[in-house]
Image: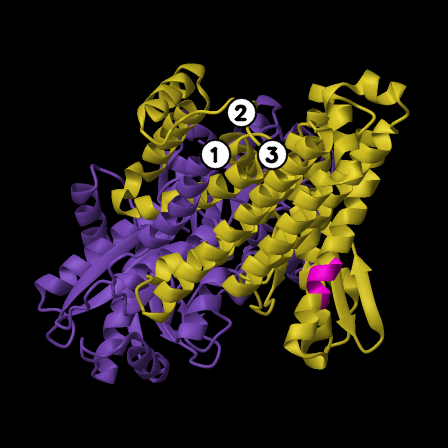
Amino acid sequence: MKKLTKVLSITAAAAMAASMMASVSVFADDVFTIGAIGPITGAAAAYGTSVMNGAQIAVEEINAAGGINGYQVELLTADDTHDAELAVNAYNDLKDQGMQLLLGTVTSAPCIAVEGEAANDNMFLLTPSGTAVDCIFGDNAFRVCFSDPAQGTASAQYIGEHGLATKIAIIYDSSDPYSAGITEYFTAEAANQGLEIVSSEAFSDNRTDFSAQLNKAKEGGAELVFLPIYYQEAALILQQAASMDFAPAFFGCDGMDGILGVENFDTSLAEGLMMLTPFTPNAEDEMTQNFVKTYEEKFDGLVPIQFGADAYDGIYAMKAALEDAGATADMSASEICDAMKASMGNITITGLTGEISWDPATGEPNKEPKAVVIQNGEYQPM
Amino acid sequence: MNTDIVKKIKNRRLRSKLITYLIVIVFYVVVQILINTGNLSSLLTGLLVPICVYVIAAVSLNLVVGISGELSLGHAGFMCVGAYTSAFLSNVVGSALPETLRFILAILTGAVFAGLFGLLIGIPVLRLKGDYLAIVTLAFGEIIKNLMNVVYVGIDSKGLHVSTTSAMDLHLEPTGKQIIKGALGISGTPKNSNFTIGVILILLTLFIVQNLIDSRSGRAVMAARDNRIAAESIGIPVTKFKLLAFAVSAALAGVAGVLYSHNLATLNTKKFDYNTSILVLVFVVLGGIGNIRGSMIAAVILTALPEMLRFLSNYRMLIYAIVLIVMMLFNWAPAAREWRERVLSRLPFGRRKAVGKEEV
């Protein structure tokens, strides 16, 4: 028996190693293969799902209209559950499947890790919604959304310029890079805008009780509470503020998007909630209307959020740049990346999130910030 | 006669140790062959370093849970200390030292600091037993994580600046560099980890753990685990030996952290919450408490499995959970064990000698 165990364990080790042999897939040269990585399961799933859906709509439209440079587009998706290590695994998996361009990742921390790999591989990376500065540190990477500094600064400017309030309280998640990053730049810009920060209270992830933070804000006489956090906690904060008769204005950033979809959340509590977001499904231009209609038809009446729009614009940006570069589908990922680096600076697209052009040196987009407010249970442009 | 038995036991122990090393080496050689012949996919190549990280973490936790008999739920906290201190060192030193030397220094720093934290935490904690100890280690793990979350450190020509409020309060010169950015953690750590170093560290870990177990101190630790009163009555300083095992385990977890932080371009504390502690504990329990080889194999399987199931897309984690339950039952449910033994004893070469417990 002893011997048997030994023999068994050694063969098991060998077999395990051998089982790692997976067939490396054959690259098709008649389609452009775009990979998308984001959280499809877990706490941030609303963002990832929305990105995948938005990208899918764009890809289907492009394919129906004849593709890019005459080639069809294939979209591959992978789940990272909002974890840096798993995002790198997902990236490697998509590479095995022949990915040539990457749309993603959706959230910041995983994006930094994936960019570390993508920069080494010279793989073109366009993140629809990774807001941290380091998400696009290499020259292979670009983004569709605003960065954290840009969002924090733009929020403070928006509040200051529109005279929304002068006494501000901030409640943020100190364990989250996105939230802490925005808070840092918001605080810096608030001083320039003549805004007074009466309280700046942090919490750490998985909190469900925010009464301490809300009480501080209430005692400080805050007229507006700035919430640079994700929608799940924001929903709880709104509920708890209402139960303690505290009714200031609330202002959030793009992470707030999705709050109307939270299960068992009384959406009347979100009335008057303002947020900085580049997209609102109730905008009246034809492009938005068509996108919302297709999205609702395809995905069981779900209303698209900003992430879907960012992804949609991201795919069209890739199309514009690929066409500018005259890229063909049989080029390798690295060749495409080299071509895209030059072409991203040449293009301007009019997308769902406005007119966007890119700075090829930094990879940051140039576009106007927009804000929306929730009225009658719907997002309305401000 | 008596010395004969002692010799036999010694030989058997030695052989068992050597086989554990052999398993690691065989695994390494097979993987290297696959890589060199181009047969290993990028997904699995990317998984090799995480596998090494979790194997080291699992083996080191087994020292506390299996050998010392204390349930610790804060193992990720020590990984966090190792990861942060070493990444900090690598970023500060930058290109001032050659890469190999810097990484060796980083590994040592991570191990020493994690070990120190283990010692500091162990002194009050190891006065508790059982459930109390489990809860307190859980709390300490979270404290370490939250501490790291509020630390901002930057460096400029005047030296190091430290703040616990915000990056603005560092008052860095314009040319200064922020290294630890609070919740943003550390980014841009050089990617020094690779599979070969990982395997060398696994072998080192095994060497330390297995020899510790077989040493005088190791036997004292196990004696204290099996019967604390009896051990105390013959003059074994129980707390001292438990502290030793705890600190060594923490230092090795720190090494796992070093390997982790030098594998990804980003490092923040989110990874080191109790979920990771529990995950490592699952490796230990599935592999068999006190069974070093088992926890290694469990760590490999459970790290690779969810990635191998990627083709199932949304059902992936559901299937993973079911597989985990089935494996746990198959390995450890009494009925399943009896069935396994029955089947094995029917095989021609499965003659069962009167062997007592699972070997350590």
Residue, disc 1: A2
Q: Residue at x 70, y 39 (%)?
A: B213
| Chain letter, colour yellow in render | B
Q: Which mark is residue B311?
A: none
Q: Earlier in the sequence, mark 3 or mark 2?
A: 2
Front residue of A15/A304: it is A15
How far apart are the alpha carbons under marks 3 and 2?
A: 13 Å
Front residue of A101/A29: it is A29
Q: Residues within 10 Å of mark 3 (few under 14, many from 20)?
A: some
Read off the chain for label 1: A
Q: Position of residue B241 (x, y in %)?
A: 82, 34
Q: Residue A47, can we see it?
A: no
Residue that lies at the very extreme toward the front in this rendered image? B1
Task: Decide if residue A180 is on the left or right side of residue B52.
Answer: right
On the same chain: label 1 and label 2?
A: no
Read off the chain for label 2: B
Pick the quarter of the image with the N terminus of chain B: top right
Secondary structure type for disc 3: loop
Question: Residue type at mark 1?
Answer: Lys
| Chain letter, colour purple in render | A
Classify A266 as above or below B183. above
Question: Residue type at mark 3?
Answer: Val
Label pair 1/3, CB-CB below 8 angstroms: no
Q: Which mark is residue B360?
A: 3
Label pair 1/2, CB-CB below 8 angstroms: yes
Secondary structure type for disc 2: loop
What residue range appears in magenta?
B105-109
Q: Residue at x 81, y 65 (%)?
A: B161
Q: Residue at x 21, y 41 (%)?
A: A299
Q: Position of residue B346 (x, y in %)?
A: 32, 23
